[in-house]
């Protein structure tokens, strides 16, 4: 059975990077309550095995389901790469699962040079979702895809060190071959990477147009919920009592599996530039 339309949208990421997707969801559906699960104890997922990624993702989505979410956005390219079909088979119609695929399609459509880049984790580069979109969109258009990855980028964002010298040095090095190969569209194939956008622009001014999937995922989530009349502002519910106090739905509820004290300043920093600035509540997922 579907959860009530007043229930929150669940968002899951291996860590705090999924906040880039939360920002897009809030911009698109400002009235929807969101419950965000960050598996900060096990981040990064990128270097883990397929089965480990699948098991950690299943546990996180189960937590969101048990805590009453009406849909779950897997705001992690790495987790999506190995889990979407399993999760959809398991939950069926009871829980819509929305996943992330690197934004190869819009990059292919926009490239002038015929060369696009994909910056992603090792897991995402290994997974079949990326291979599928390359086959489907890049190959037929004759566009060459250059990939880049570094296991250090997600940890930089998790520690709030996107503007450190070490992070700049790493980005400079891994993106140099892409710049040298006339890449003009750079797909940010990890939800942590929109937080590196400013650093990339500083290092490679006007070289790459950065493309991510956040806005597309927010549109897809809205479409799915609207289709099931599960949006808070669906016309069908106009005569029912306001479901949640506005203040409560405007507060972002977050849970982490690791230390709350360590995550709090980084969450504050990552949400800092958010146009829809709103308060957040932060707890541990498994103990108070
Ligand atoms: N945000 C995750 C992604 O989109 C990071 C994966 C990781 O933990 O390595 O891929």
Image (cartoon, rainbow, N blue to C red):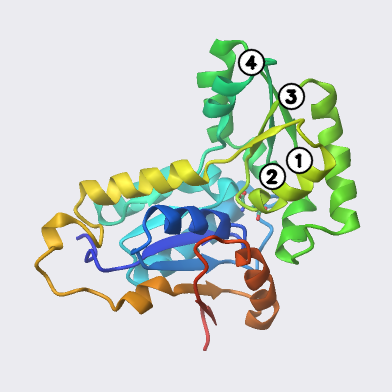
Spatial CA distance of label 2 from label 4 is 21 Å
- The percent position of residue 274, horizontal first and vertical second, equals 57, 61
- Who comes first in sequence, dot 2 or dot 1? 2
Judged left or right of residue 80, residue 90 is: left
Q: Which mark is residue 121?
A: 2
Q: Do callouts 1 and 3 mark residues in contact (Cβ within 8 Å)?
A: no
- The percent position of residue 180, horizontal first and vertical second, equals 85, 24
Q: Is residue 57 above or below residue 35?
A: above
- Who comes first in sequence, dot 1 or dot 4? 4
Q: Which mark is residue 149?
A: 1
- The percent position of residue 261, horizontal first and vertical second, equals 67, 83
Of the two numbered discs 3 and 2 in the rendering, the one whose residue sits closer to the viewer: 3
The crowding category of the residue bearing disc 3, from other C-alpha atoms within 10 Å (few below 14, some 14 to 19, many at least 20), is many
Q: Which mark is residue 225?
A: none
Q: Is residue 65 above or below residue 154?
A: below
- The percent position of residue 93, horizontal first and vertical second, equals 25, 51
Residue 150 seen: no
Q: Residue at x 52, y 38 (%)?
A: 101
Judged left or right of residue 165, residue 6 is: left
Q: Which residue is mark 3?
A: 183
Spatial CA distance of label 2 from label 1 is 6 Å
Q: Do callouts 2 and 4 mark residues in contact (Cβ within 8 Å)?
A: no
Q: Residue at x 55, y 34 (%)?
A: 103
Secondary structure category for the residue under label 3: loop
Q: Is residue 271 above or below residue 153?
A: below
- Who comes first in sequence, dot 1 or dot 3? 1
Of the two numbered discs 4 and 3 in the rendering, the one whose residue sits closer to the viewer: 3
- Who comes first in sequence, dot 3 or dot 2? 2
Q: Which residue is mark 4?
A: 143
Q: Residue at x 63, y 20 (%)?
A: 111
- The one nearer the camera, 188 or 235, is 235
Image quadrant assignment for residue 240: bottom left
């Amino acid at each position: 059975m579907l959860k009530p339309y007043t229930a929150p949208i669940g968002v899951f990421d291996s860590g705090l990077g999924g906040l880039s997707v939360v920002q897009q969801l809030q911009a698109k559906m400002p009235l929807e309550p969101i419950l965000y699960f960050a598996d900060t104890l096990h981040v990064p997922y990128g270097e883990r095995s397929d089965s480990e990624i699948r098991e950690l993702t299943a546990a996180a989505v189960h937590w969101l389901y048990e805590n009453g979410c009406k849909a779950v956005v897997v705001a992690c390219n790495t987790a999506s790469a190995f889990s979407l079909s399993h999760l959809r088979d398991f939950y069926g119609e009871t829980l819509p699962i929305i996943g992330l695929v690197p934004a190869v399609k819009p990059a292919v459509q926009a490239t002038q040079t015929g060369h696009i880049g994909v910056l992603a984790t090792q897991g995402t580069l290994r997974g079949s979702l990326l291979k599928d979109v390359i086959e489907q969109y890049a190959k037929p258009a004759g566009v060459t895809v250059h990939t880049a990855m570094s296991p250090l980028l997600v940890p930089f964002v998790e520690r709030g060190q996107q503007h450190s010298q070490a992070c700049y040095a790493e980005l400079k090095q891994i993106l140099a071959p892409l710049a040298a190969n006339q890449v003009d569209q750079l797909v940010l194939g990890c939800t942590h990477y929109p937080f590196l956008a400013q650093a990339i622009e500083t290092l490679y001014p006007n070289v790459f147009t950065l493309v991510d999937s956040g806005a597309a995922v927010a549109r897809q989530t809205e479409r799915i919920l609207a289709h099931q009349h599960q949006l808070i502002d669906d016309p069908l519910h106009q005569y029912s009592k306001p479901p949640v106090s506005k203040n409560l739905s405007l507060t972002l509820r977050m849970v982490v599996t690791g230390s709350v004290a360590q995550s709090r300043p980084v969450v504050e920093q990552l949400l800092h530039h958010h146009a829809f600035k709103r308060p957040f509540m932060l707890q541990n997922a498994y103990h108070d």
